[in-house]
Amino acid sequence: MITYYQHLADEQATCQFGATLVKLIYNITGDNGFIIYLNGELGAGKTTLSRGMIQGLGHSGNVKSPTYTLVEEYHLADRHIYHFDLYRLNDPEELEFMGIRDYFTANTICLIEWAEKGNGTLHSADLLINLAYDENARRIELIANSSRGADIIAQLQHITE
Ligand code: ADP
Ligand code: MG
């Protein structure tokens, strides 16, 4: 298993890590889509990391939590960024009704909080990210789930060496 861990001391570190990560993803994906599942309990930092990624691609406004809308979308740097939060999803069929398959196309980056609620209706991820409490800070773990996910981890290891 190809994995990467990092301690994130505070909210700023989480945002900064998101910005670094999304730039690597942007550089390797070209016209391809890229999918990240974000796991971790409430308050672990999934939305904060997503905000760091979205702002890292140049978004200067707010990043709303998609808790009630299920998805918020951004068009940045020639990419579509879809930020999902499936916490309130009752039935994975709702995803079929919203046309979930159309989101996983070329030129998109999908960030999916609570992907486990999507149960079988989602494409598999390129990267699995787990966020966990570490006293008052957080710990992030990335697991590669595709060859491009593995490329990203290799680059992160190189940067932080
Ligand atoms: P989630 O989407 O996982 O429910 P949020 O990102 O909405 O979590 O909330 C995370 C909370 O933890 C926010 O209050 C944020 O300021 C804080 N936070 C984020 N990253 C860190 C960190 N590395 N250390 C301490 N607190 C953090
Ligand atoms: Mg959230």
Image (spheres, rainbow, N blue to C red):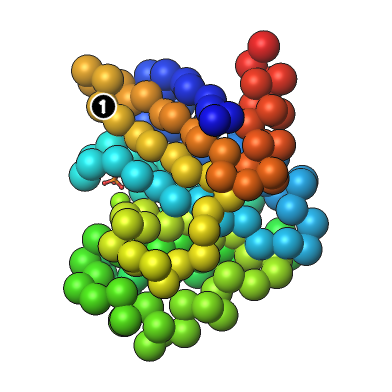
Give the residue displayed 58% in from the left and 29% down from the top: 2
Number of numbered discs on residues: 1
Residue drawn at the location 32% of the way across and 57% of the way down:
116
Which picture quadrant has residue 80?
A: bottom right
Residue 47 in sight in this render: yes
Count residues near mark 1 (Cα–Cα under 10 Å), then give few for <14, some for 14-19, many for 20+.
some
Q: Which quadrant would residue 19 be assigned to in this image?
A: top right
Mark 1 lies on a secondary structure that is strand
The reply, left or right, for residue 71 in relation to residue 104 is left
| Residue drawn at point x = 42 percent, y = 29 percent | 140
Quick check: is the Cβ at mark 1 less than 8 Å away from ligand 1?
Answer: no
In the depicted structure, whether residue 148 falls above or below residue 65: above
Q: Is residue 69 left or right of residue 63?
A: left
Q: Looking at the image, can residue 51 be seen?
A: no
User: Measured from the top left, where is residue 150 in percent x and y?
Assistant: 65, 37
Residue furthest out toward the top: 161
Residue type highlighted by circle 1: Tyr
Quadrant assignment for the N terminus? top right
Q: Is residue 62 above or below residue 11?
A: below
Question: The C terminus lies in which quarter of the figure?
Answer: top right
Residue 144, position as x, y percentages in the image: 57, 39
Q: Which residue is mark 1?
A: 133
Where residue 155 appears, as percent x and y from the top left, is: 71, 29
**Image side of residue 34 versus residue 99, left or right:** right
User: Which image quarter: residue 35?
Assistant: bottom right
Q: Position of residue 3 (x, y in %)?
A: 53, 28
Query: At 37% across and 31% down in the image, what residue appears?
Result: 11
Of residues 116 and 10, the one drawn nearer to the viewer in this rendering: 116
If the picture is divided into quarters, which one holds ligand 1? top left
Residue 7 against residue 148 in the figure, above or below? above
